Amino acid sequence: MTGAGALAQFGRAGKWLALLGAAALAGCQVVPKGPPRPIDVPPPVVVEPVGPSLPSDTQRNRVALLVPLTGPNAAVGESISNAANMAVLDTGGKTIRVTMYDTATGAAAAAQKAIAEGNKLILGPLLAEDVRVVAPIARASRVPVVTFSNDVGVAGNGVYVMGFAPAQSIERVVAYAKSKGATKFAGLVPAGLYGQRASTAFLRSVEAAGGQVVSLQTFDRTAGSITAAITRMSNTSPYDAVLIADSARVAVQAGPVIRAHGGAGARLLGTELWNAEGALAANPALRGAWFASVSDGVYTQLAGKYRTRFGKGPYRLASLGYDAVLLVTRIGGDWKFGSAFPANRLSDAGGFTGIDGAFRFGRDGIAERALEVQQAGPSGFVVVDGAPRGF
């Protein structure tokens, strides 16, 4: 993700999303390089129950949705699958059949069954470890995989990562902090693979922005370890901003300690993990903190519609299921019945517009996203630097 201001504005591209609450959500739009074109309205899509075997299709392309529908991650998988069904119905198309497969009972078995039943594209899985199992099975049958994972390590060679990559969030918020006068940065990152990648992203982002990293400390998510890391950080040079590259729960623990150990005037920075934790803003130590994430504007409308239909709110990742179907529906105009999915269209340079704003897949298979910067305050999160409309 490029820094603030590095992405060009779209003009009117993506304007259709404003219609979400009034009627059906429109199909995922390919953003043109010139003036926006009218959105093609796809033919209706029909979602049919999955039985012992799928009926023969001659006028619909089959798409598999692989998510956990049982087990500990069932609630998240259910949100994604429900949102995907909403997108199928809302687009009103009739060119694809979306079938759900439960990865909790075995990701390999789910992928094998999906391919045996004629699916030419896999949406999911959610977990990186499941992607590693599914990818070679799908690759052998030349079936692309658009995963909801945010682990960029699984991207490439037929796998497209649609999840929110932490490195892009870090780059965006660091660039914004630098633009507002921060020059000396400190960082707190958890031990493990996530922390290693966050550290690399942080160091590169600060260097690219023209700042200086004066301290980078690792912790193991226990209260004592967090305090010890902050104490070590306080013994280094003063800093203008400190990145807490972890969840809102960790930020709530770390914030007051930072304030009490040499960081009283420092700006706290966070990642996209903070986006789903509105209660974080109520913590006095975190007021004024900045973090970068996808926009919530249209997602809020989707969540309201979801709540009305299913009687409960969705998990934040539900938008990935919705946008994945919009993406397929939009590209579906170039997808001949019974043929391989046109995966080359996923890398359209102009990108696409969905519930989570503008995004596009790079040659590495990772979704680049247009992110906004939000600030925590007494009344919740407020957008202080909006997401670019396109690329």
Image (cartoon, rainbow, N blue to C red):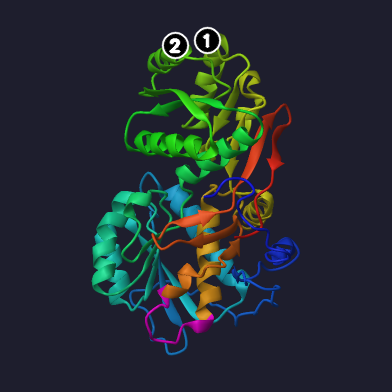
Residue 12, position as x, y percentages in the image: 73, 65
The CA distance from mark 2 to mark 1 is 7 Å
Specify start and end residues of the magenta stretch as a single range. Answer: 333-343
Question: Measuring 66% from the left and 66% from the top, which residue is drawn there?
Answer: 25
Q: Is residue 169 above or below residue 349?
A: above
Query: Any magenta on residue 341?
Result: yes
Query: What's the mark number on residue 360?
Result: none
Dot 2 lies on which element? helix
Which class describes the residues within 10 Å of circle 2: few (<14), some (14-19), or many (20+)? some
Q: Secondary structure at mark 1?
A: loop
Question: Nearest the camera: 20 or 211?
Answer: 211
Residue denoted by label 2: 231
Residue 222 shown left or right of residue 129 in the figure: right
Quarter the C terminus occupies: bottom right
User: Along the polypeptide, which appears first: circle 2 or circle 1?
Assistant: 2
In x, y percent, where is residue 251? 52, 25
Q: Residue furthest front?
A: 210
- At x 56%, y 68%, the residue is 326
* Magenta-colored segment: predominant secondary structure: loop
> In the image, is residue 210 above or below residue 370?
above
The image quadrant that residue 180 belongs to is: top right
Residue 146: give x, y in percent of width and height. Answer: 41, 63
Vertical arrangement, residue 106 with respect to residue 249, above or below: below
Three-letter amino acid code at the position of disc 2:
Thr
Instruction: Name the residue rendered at 70%, 41% in the picture.
Output: 383
Picture coordinates of residue 347, whole percent (x, y): 47, 68
Amino acid type indicated by mark 1: His
The mark found on residue 261 in the picture is 1
Question: Mark 2–mark 1 contact, CB under 8 Å?
Answer: yes
